[in-house]
Amino acid sequence: MDPERPLASWIGSDRLEDRVVPTLTLILRTPGCSWRRCRMCSYRHEQHGTLEEAERLVRGQLAWVENEHGGREYDYVKVFSSGSLLDPGEVPPPALDAIGDAFRGKTLLVESRPEFVDRERVAGLAARVDTGRSANPVQVAIGLETTNDMVREKSIDKGFSFSMYLNAVREARAAGARVKAYLLHKPLFLTESEALMDMERSITDVSPHADLISMNPCTVQRNTELERHWRQGAYRPPYLWSVLSILLGAQRHVSADPLGGGRRRGPHNCGACDREIVDAIRSYSLEADRSRLVEAMAIPCDCKREWEFVLEHERPYCLPLTR
Amino acid sequence: MRLEIRSRDGLARTGALIHDDQVLQSPCAADVQALFPSLSSRFLENVPLSAGESFTDAWLVSGNEPHTVHPASSLEVPRGEALMVANWNSALANPAAYVRYLVALKERLPPDAAWYAPAAAIPSNAALLAWSGFDLFDRTGPDLATAQRRFLLPEGEFKEGAMGCGYCDCPGCAAGDLLNHNRLALDRELALVRWYIRKGRIRDLIDGRCRHDSSSVAIVRLIDQHYQFIEPRTPVTGPIPFRANSSEALSRPEVRRFAERVLSRYRPARTDTVVLLPCSARKPYSVSRSHRLFANAIRGRAHEVIVTSPLGCVPRETELCYPAAHYDVPVTGHWDAEEVAVISEILASYLERHGFRRVIAHLEGGALSVARVAAERAGVSLETTVVGERPTGDGSLAELDTALDGNLHRHEDPLRGLALFQFDRELTSTGLRVRGRYPDIQYLRNRAPLFGIDARLGSLRPSFEGWSLLGDAYRVVIDDFVPQGDILAPGVLEGDPRIRPGDEVFVVGPSACATGRAAMSLDEMLRSRRGVAVRRRKVMKREH
């Protein structure tokens, strides 16, 4: 098997069962997402090989990872592709089996759209990973984005409903897997306050139906519909103040990765206070220490008045008020 | 909300916004959420200006006043109700898109509705927005600036500290109240905007205001470039003087229209010899000292054309037409490359089109360079008659006189020039009686007045008898009624698509005919349900 480099792979830290553990994150090349319509997603341009070549491609990447990271300690593996690991039309069953085998004994997270979360498939994967070390060795991550079907359709064009997500949760849990919900903070066409309320509501609504919640503040990725609107001045990523406010208001720990934080294409404030707030959010995501959020929220920056004004006065017919 | 337009100036208009028992002088800033409480209950309705047709069709929500409109949507707006161009605030930083959206919206949506631009206006862009044809604004802009600690002036946005510089003594500044200052600054600028629109001078204000912001300059230039869109909306007569003080003057619709009419409507009565002459500060040219000297030398022995910036070339017979007798330019003696290029192009087309046997340039300096470039492009040889430095010098005048030896005498006919330029109709004053002193003259046949020249407006004013010589040019066809006063837009059935605001028109209907001046373009007459279409001068009942 020729080793083949994945799109990305790195060892970092992540939160698992209330501990911070070394984690391998792996983004695999696959034939790509079967949906490819989401307005903010640039991964839809990642298409590698045909379905027939997919197994060889996946095995090659696993071999590369073994060469690269085989000697390193890690307990948690998170595997992504530009689509769904559980989609047999993207990752053929033997390739999924190979992934399970490669990370036997670890906790394995795989991301998938809900329509591909099938209890047999998840159970099969769990059987390969399971060594009895963990009660729930497999986590299924689903990009639910929001619990509001109208927002998901209009602002994202995601192509599934909250009820389809709930069905996927039942399937995954029946197979003994845990479920991680990804939420998207401020997709297109929302005011700052609509986006904030959308996340508050989504966290509340999804809580009984997710073991882990991660909220991604939206970033402007290249070659997307979102980028086109952003270039026309029709979109502004969320304020970091909003991110803080949502995390602080949540009844449970919600992690957030402010990718591109402080940059024009990512969640940002005025530029002066951004770094400190991004650090606080990252730290909270990992350590779950609320005091970091409380401290960050108390940073005395002038732009907080602007954010408060925008929350109150930005309306769906005059957005964005700021850049 | 109803809009009663009192004056139009291009896309801009001023008048009254009438809402329940409130009357607001427009354009103005108001608490729009209080005027339209339904605005507060709009959620998740955003459709950005950059959205395409299918997204807009699927997601645009309309039905409540002010009615949301979108450049890619074909949704209609109920008559007499206000419309809102949602997210117009996001267009300002994007000149090309701003103009593209504006053209699409203005060409489709009712011109007589109140146009609301949400969260867009601050003092430094209020004139531009009003010039673009918006009537109603809110105070989100000044209030946001206050939250950002910015001090707003018509000249731009400054840090809060500028408040202490002593420039403004409004009650807000006196009390150190930034919010109050920012709101008052917007109100004050809009009061000035209304005054400029009433005077027909909004372009003068814009030409100055836009300089503080590159996007504003770009928007002005791009709208000028949309000539087919802006020209029909531009009045045929305008402010006096016509201030051609910026480099954009060359592309202003009035200037381009003048050149196009000279080239397409006007034709010289003789093509044996053309003399190219310099312009004069005093207008019309022929009453100036220098042109009286030229006239003495030429004595009607050639076709006369004045070479000038920014108009290009002005045949003597059209020297009264707006803005030839009305423009003012900064005189430095220097012609820049853009002027030379644009004006020589116009002159070359004129020379090519009419095939003059001799072309005499009685010019010096930049104007002479223009003539040389034009002659070369047109493939004609140029005779020059200026000796030494000055066209008005004795030597130059003698040279010009001699050059025309043997040419036939034939006097220029202002009636002919004006009729061609204004109505695209060839008339002659031969056989008519002329009364008055140029340029304020009247043409009569027997004792009946046919045409008067309104030198101030630069136009010909036909009587009923005069209109009978103009065929069906510039007619407005009305319904079966006898106008008791001005003719209102709903009464207009059809007309000459060449009609622009300010044009002399002939109104005809089954029961009456009338003379008057158009208050709007024909297109706007047909698309409006209210407002004065033609200011009536005289009316005559017709016998059935």
Image: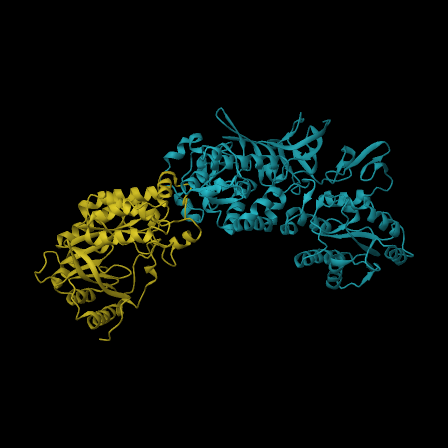
Chain colours: A yellow, B cyan
Counting from the top left corner in percent of width and height, residue B374 is at 73, 60
- Residue closest to the eye, B348 or B309: B309
Instruction: Report the side of B440 relative to B32 (left or right).
Output: right
Counting from the top left corner in percent of width and height, residue A118 is at 18, 55
Quadrant location of the C terminus of chain B in the rendered image: top right
Residue at x-position 84% and y-position 60%: B387
User: Is residue B70 in view?
Assistant: no
Q: In the rendered image of this protein, does residue B479 appear above or below residue B250?
A: above
Residue at x-position 80% and y-position 64%: B381
- Residue closest to the eye, B156 or B489: B156
> For the view shown, which residue lies furthest in the bottom direction?
A2
> For the view shown, which residue lies furthest in the left direction?
A132
- Residue closest to the eye, B315 or A163: B315
Q: How many marks?
A: 0
> For the view shown, which residue lies furthest in the right direction?
B406
Instruction: Report the side of B175 relative to B273 (left or right).
Output: left
Counting from the top left corner in percent of width and height, residue B175 is at 46, 33
Q: In the rendered image of this protein, does residue B57 appear above or below residue B79?
A: below
Residue at x-position 22% and y-position 44%: A250
Instruction: Report the side of A30 relative to B465 (left or right).
Output: left
Instruction: Report the side of B242 relative to B297 (left or right).
Output: left
Counting from the top left corner in percent of width and height, residue A191 is at 36, 43
Q: Where, by quadrant of the figure, is residue A73 drawn?
A: bottom left
